[in-house]
């Protein structure tokens, strides 16, 4: 009996030791990779801002955080205000997140000073493989679901199936609805930025190479 108890105790001690070691290894790996992952995300965002604002040489002069209640939950929007080399306002690029078919869908949408859509890019998605890539192209200028130049101020962007005028991605109405919701929410945040914004880190420069 004592031999069995001793064996069980040894097994427990070994398992605890292994768990502690693995926990330490995972924490170390997370620490080591955290910096490069953030740097890559920052680079993707910087390139995204240039893309959605038309590719001009630009400077991000303010990064504002807006908190809004959407569908009963608090949503956060990041508004990047941009200017050209002559310090003239170009408009804003807004990070907007909503739920898609497979999980969160994060979109960066550009608006000019009149509220017209200048461009967009998908920052993050958990959609079925292939659908995320389709969404990144489907709504671009000249494509079937083209939203460039449109303004949600006239009417929200809605798929044709729901009475709107935007063609849904083939066999992917749910992803399309989620994308358009993110764009419409971004516009709502844009129109309220002057009163609701809480300014974060400012004067972050992102210029075209």
Image (spheres, helix red, strand yellow):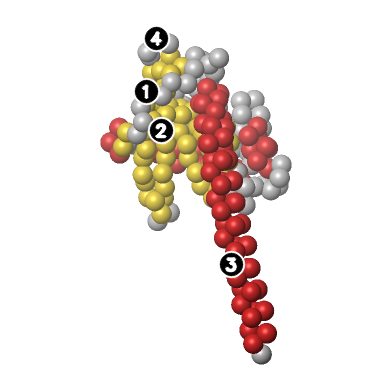
Q: Are marks 4 and 3 in contact (CB under 8 Å)?
A: no
Residues under numbered marks 1 and 4 in contact, where contact means CB atoms less than 8 Å apart: no
Residue shown at 40% from the left, 56% from the top? 72
For marks 1 and 4 on the same chain, the one whose residue lies earlier in the sequence: 4
Badge 3 or badge 2: first in the primary sequence: 3
Considering the numbered disc 3 on the image, is that residue within a helix, a strand or a loop?
helix
Q: For mark 4, what is the residue?
A: 86
Q: Position of 184 compared to 142: left or right?
A: left
Residue 97 in the image: x percent, y percent? 50, 44
Q: Residues within 10 Å of mark 4 (few under 14, many from 20)?
A: few
Give me the C-alpha separation between circle 1 and circle 4: 15 Å
Secondary structure of the residue carrying numbered label 1:
loop
For the point 48% across and 40% down, which residue is it? Answer: 96
Per the image, label 2 sits on a secondary structure element best described as strand
Provide residue 41's location: percent of width, then percent of height: 54, 34
Q: Identify the mark nearer the N-term, 1 or 2.
A: 2
Comparing labels 1 and 3, the label whose residue is closer to the camera? 3
Q: Is residue 166 above or below residue 49?
A: below
Report the number of numbered marks: 4
Name the front one of labels 3 and 2: 3
Residue at image point 56% right, 47% down: 28
* Residue 44 at x, y percent in the picture: 56, 30
Q: Which residue is mark 3?
A: 16
Distance CA(mark 3)–CA(mark 2): 47 Å
Residue 52 position, x and y percent, is 53, 26
Q: Which residue is mark 1?
A: 203
The residue beneath circle 2 is 79
């Amino acid at each position: 009996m004592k031999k069995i108890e001793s064996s069980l105790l040894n097994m427990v001690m070994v398992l605890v030791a292994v768990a502690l070691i693995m926990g330490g290894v995972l924490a170390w790996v997370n620490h080591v990779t955290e910096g490069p992952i953030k740097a890559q995300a920052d680079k993707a965002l910087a390139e995204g801002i240039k893309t959605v604002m038309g590719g001009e040489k630009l400077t991000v002069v303010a990064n504002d955080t807006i908190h809004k209640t959407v569908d009963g939950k608090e949503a956060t929007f990041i508004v990047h205000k941009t200017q050209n080399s002559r310090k003239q306002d170009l408009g804003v690029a807004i990070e907007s997140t909503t739920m898609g078919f497979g999980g969160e869908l994060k979109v960066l949408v550009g608006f000019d000073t009149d509220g017209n859509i200048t461009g967009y890019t998908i920052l993050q998605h958990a959609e079925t493989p292939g659908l995320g890539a389709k969404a990144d192209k489907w709504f671009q200028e000249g494509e079937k679901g083209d939203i460039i130049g449109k303004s949600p101020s006239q009417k929200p962007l809605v798929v044709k199936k729901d009475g709107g005028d935007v063609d849904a991605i083939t066999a992917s109405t749910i992803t399309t609805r989620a994308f358009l919701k993110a764009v419409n929410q971004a516009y709502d945040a844009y129109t309220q930025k002057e009163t609701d914004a809480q300014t974060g880190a400012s004067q972050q420069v992102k210029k075209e190479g």
